[in-house]
Amino acid sequence: MTSLRNRLPRLSGNRLVLLLGCWGWVVVGQTLFPPLPAYQAWERGDTAATLRILQQLREHPTAEVRWEAAYLQGHIAALRGETAEALRHWYFVSQHGAGTDLAREAAYRRADLLLASHKDQEAALYLLRSLIEDTLTAPDLRTAAENRLLYYFFYQADLGTLWHLSEKGHPFFYPYLRRALDYQLRQGCFWEAWKLWQQYFVSACETSATVTDFVFPAETLRVVLLLPFMAAQERNSPFLEFWQGFELGLAESRSVIKTWQVRVVDSERNLSRIQELLKEWDSHPPHIIIGDVSWSINQLIADFCERRCIWHAIPMNPTPLPKSYSFTLLTPASCAGERMGEYLARMRDSLGRGICLYETDEPQVSAYLAGMRRYWNVESYPISSNLSELTRQWSVLRDSVSSKDWYMVAVLREEALGFILHKLGRDTLPPLVIGMEPWLQLRHTQLKDYWRIRIQVPQMTIIDSVQWYPFARKVRLQYAQRATFFHAQGYDAARAVVRFWNARPSNQSYPIRYAGILGKFLHPSDCTGYSFRLWQYERGEVRVWDIY
């Protein structure tokens, strides 16, 4: 608050408050009294005169004016670092103006100052809780109180305080504490403590006295979210962000099943770990397994799910599996290839002679090319993604490659890709190089820097800006961090799975469509239902257009 003129008398009931700025008079009901010259003195920078006028107004016969003066005295005292004086003035407003909007705002200021000065945490939390629970609190003040509570839990309270409050504090604070403690444990990389917190307080695991005392009703859908959480030892792990988005999406979804038991499990990217988990689930299987992101691990999970008739959703990986109970939550790589093959077939006459160079032993590339060949089968050569081996191989391929007009390069490993793009460049008539969607997320390679080639990259995952901005605000409020692509993937995954489960009859797939933040989800996959965006990089310039 930089100007006292921002603080006008806030009167309750049927009293009329009107500031006549041009004349500087305030009308309260039918009573006319001199304006608050304190505003003018404060704006002139005359603090002494301001305080003198406010002290005089503390003797005013109108109660609302006395409260307003005390409120402004507290504000000035806080700005001057006089914490005790500020609290005293605001306490006066809270006590004598109880039930008014100004008293509630004074209570908020007291709580804010108590937390900032580390004076009395319990009193501050009580004041904020009272404001949030009070049905008469103005919406903007309630939002401010919630934000102040979150700010304290996320950035000012230490881990010991949060843990103590989670065990001994008022139940009202638990939703705020859970998010803050989860955030602080991850920010500090206290992974073992975070894992314990997830298992004990957050995850709804199997009913066991050693893990949880939760008892689930008969109509409970058991879901396992299986991701390599501990494999990414960084502050902003994409798997943690996926879980946060999934949690948010599940909370906002409506399901025919009243209770969803979500068990969060770390796969550790370890096949032995997966085999142990599958053996454990064999006697009491979940209804849906979401994960993992690894092709080899997903094969084990898919075989288990096929045998036990369990639905298997694959997140963060577009490579489909040829199993009736497994489906990917992104646009399948085979559909991406099919749509690109259809587009190239339409452009056949203008493209000229082409060749496909593809990376071996890469499941996503194999699925992409299988889809593309349904519309156009082009001359293809397998290449290694190992740079030293690729260098030797290139000396054999060079003559065959140099005579072509365009190239389909189905390579995902960035080091090998950079080598190929450099070798394909020409000083005259730059050839067309067609890539894959993962090229848009390269860490070290800037596609626009290749001036001696023309690059086109299809994008199947298209962000819906109408849904994105409200979603980003939710993530910021819920987790106090910026929304990412992985948050959106988790959010879409949860809503798609709920939509899928609501639509399907028992043990049979059911055609469903879900338009999420990152594009469409279709099950069973219908490649004709996907559109894509084409990015073109040519001589440092980028063009984008949509293909339907």
Image (cartoon, rainbow, N blue to C red):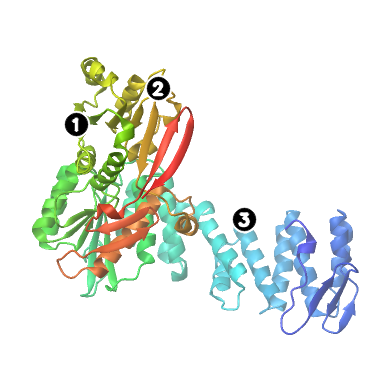
Q: Please name the amino acid that badge 2 sits on.
A: Leu
Q: Which one is in front in this view, the residue at disc 1 or the one at disc 3?
A: 1
Place of residue 180 in the rendered image (x, y in percent of width and height, measured from the top left): 45, 56
Badge 1 local density, few (<14 within 10 Å), some, or many (20+)? some
Q: Which residue is mark 2?
A: 429
Q: Is residue 108 rendered to the left or right of residue 400? A: right
Give the structural element (helix, strand or loop) at label 3. Answer: helix
Q: In the rendered image, which quarter is residue 90 located in? A: bottom right
Q: Please name the amino acid that badge 3 sits on.
A: Ala
Q: CA distance from mark 2 to mark 1?
A: 29 Å
Q: Which residue is mark 1?
A: 360
Q: Which residue is mark 3?
A: 116
Give the structural element (helix, strand or loop) at label 1. Answer: loop
Residue at point 35%, 29% (across, down): 432
Mark 2 or mark 3: whose residue is earlier in sequence: 3
Place of residue 166 in the rendered image (x, y in percent of width and height, measured from the top left): 42, 62
Residue at point 47%, 27% (across, down): 539
